[in-house]
Image: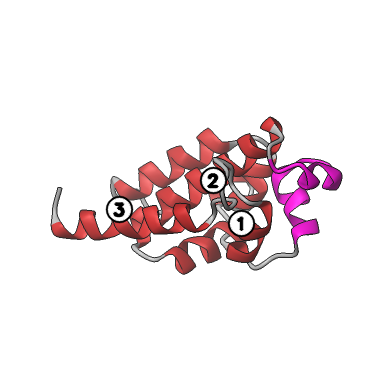
Amino acid sequence: MTHAQLAQSKVVSGFVDSLQEPRTPYISPKRLSQALGVKVANLAQLTGVHRNTLRNPSSERLQGRMREMVKVISATTELTGDVKKAIFWYRNEPIADYGHRTAAELVADGQVEAVLAFIRDLENGARG
């Protein structure tokens, strides 16, 4: 692992650690919404779960959807080297290959693997 890869790994790890619900093994909906710059209520839309589900952070469906979001943001952070840039791209950058929808929209629709494949293509030198 190169020095740059190690540094990026620490950035990703720090981001993921910052999302943990205190004293639990769960991602905190509140902390993730803060990281994304959205209200907690809007997180329900981004995760594709009912807003009442956010009151139960241990909900397996909610945790699964938030893990998918974190997986994509982490992969993007490895590419950009910057969590804030990765989150901005995730929420705002339309992807031409997918009907000009954002990664956030695609992930909310359950198309995580398509977004991860797109990121791998970018890593391998394809142009988005």
Residue 125 at x, y = what percent?
29, 50
Q: Looking at the image, tell me whether mark 1 or mark 3 is earlier in sequence order.
A: 3
Q: Residue furthest top?
A: 60
Residue 101, image x, y percentages: 64, 51
The image quarter containing residue 57 is top right
Taking 80 as reference, is 103 above or below it?
Answer: above
The residue indicated by pointer 3 is 9
Q: Residues within 10 Å of mark 3 (few under 14, many from 20)?
A: some
Of residues 15 and 85, the one drawn nearer to the viewer in this rendering: 15
Which callout, 2 or 1, points at the residue further toward the start of the chain? 1
Instruction: Report if residue 44 lies within the magenta region.
Output: yes
Magenta stretch: dominant secondary structure: helix
Is 37 one of the magenta-colored residues? no
Cα separation between marks 2 and 1: 27 Å
Q: Residues within 10 Å of mark 2 (few under 14, many from 20)?
A: few
Q: Secondary structure at mark 3?
A: helix
Residue at 67% from the left image edge and 49% from the top image edge = 105
Residue at image mark 1? 32
Foreground mark, 3 or 2? 3
Residue 60, above or below 103: above
Q: Residue at x 55, y 52 (%)?
A: 95
Please give the residue where the numbered disc 2 appears in the rendered image. Answer: 97
From which residue to which does the magenta span run? 40-57
Q: Label 1 is placed on what type of residue? A: Leu
Label 3 – label 2 distance at C-alpha: 28 Å
Residue 112 is left or right of residue 49, and the answer is: left
Q: Amino acid at mark 3?
A: Ser
Under circle 2, the secondary element is helix
